[in-house]
Structure formats: C-alpha cells, structure tokens
Amino acid sequence: MNKMPKKRKGKIKYEYAHDIQEKFKEIVESLGLSYIMLDSVSCYRSYGSRSRRTVARCHTLGKLMQQALGRKGFYVLEFISERFDKLDDKEKTKIIIHELMHIPKSFGGGFRYHDYVCEKNIESLYKKFVDKSKNLEISKFNIL
C-alpha cells in the first residue's frame, strides 16, 4: 500500500540575521576578501526547515534574474536556526566561513563547490581569521 507523503505542518520562516551579518562582515574584512561586495550579501536565519543535516545554505540570484533586474550577483546566506544557534562560537564562525567560501571571486551568481570549500581550506581561513583577530586585540591594547 502506498503511503501518502506527510503534509508540511508549517512554512519555513525567514528573518534578517543582523548578528550573523555583522560577524560575516568582520570575517570578510579581516581576511581581506575584497571581491565580496558586502552590500550584495545578506544573512538570514530560517526557522522550520525539515532538512536533517544542513546547518546553512548559500543562495544566489541566477544569471537570467540578474539580467532581468539589471544588476550583478547577489547572495543570501541562510542559517538554519534549529542547528546553527546551538553551536559554539568557533563552529558558528567556521560555518560562516564555509558559506562565504561558496561565493566565487567573479561574484557573478555562481558557486564554488566542495572541491574548494573543504575542511582543509575552511580550517586554513579560520586560523588566519583567529590570528588576525588576536593581532588586532593586541594592537588595540598597545594603543591604550
């Protein structure tokens, strides 16, 4: 006997994630990723996703939509609240780095895939970010 698919109980809800947007901006600026146009990337928190293992997703405005709207690439980073918010700060930072690594240098609406966005490269950028953050804190302390 065929089972009917379960009906979705609720819709996914989205809200702008100011705190994640600020951390994203801090990471991009600290790492010197000048190809990322900060005004063309938005961070959102979603609620109610039924995905099982996904913590975050990168969405883009496709080429046809860019042409129709007369604009360049635009990216939305979605962070699934039920999973992301439970992580510690280190893991949250790594997830943000993971998602921003999907944005290619061309900033043209495409994606970098997991051959580039891998644990080794994420760890490398995370270490660079932490080192730069420590140096910034030390220099702030020495100014006083």
Image (cartoon, rainbow, N blue to C red):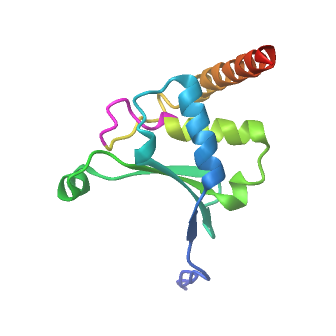
- Which image quadrant is residue 91 in? top right
Q: Please give the name of the residue rendered at 46% of the width and 41% of the height, measured from the top-left corner.
A: 38
Magenta region, residue range: 101-108
Where's the N terminus, which quadrant? bottom right
Q: Is residue 40 left or right of residue 125?
A: left
Q: Please give the name of the residue rendered at 70% of the width and 20% of the height, measured from the top-left corner.
A: 136
Q: Is residue 54 visible?
A: no
Q: Is residue 80 above or below residue 111?
A: below
Q: Is residue 68 left or right of residue 126?
A: left
Q: Is residue 73 above or below residue 85?
A: above
Q: Is residue 87 above or below residue 140?
A: below
Q: Please give the name of the residue rendered at 24% of the width and 57% of the height, measured from the top-left corner.
A: 65
Residue 135 % position (x, y): 72, 16
Residue 106 % position (x, y): 32, 32
Q: Is residue 72 left or right of residue 35?
A: left
Q: Main secondary structure of the magenta part?
A: loop
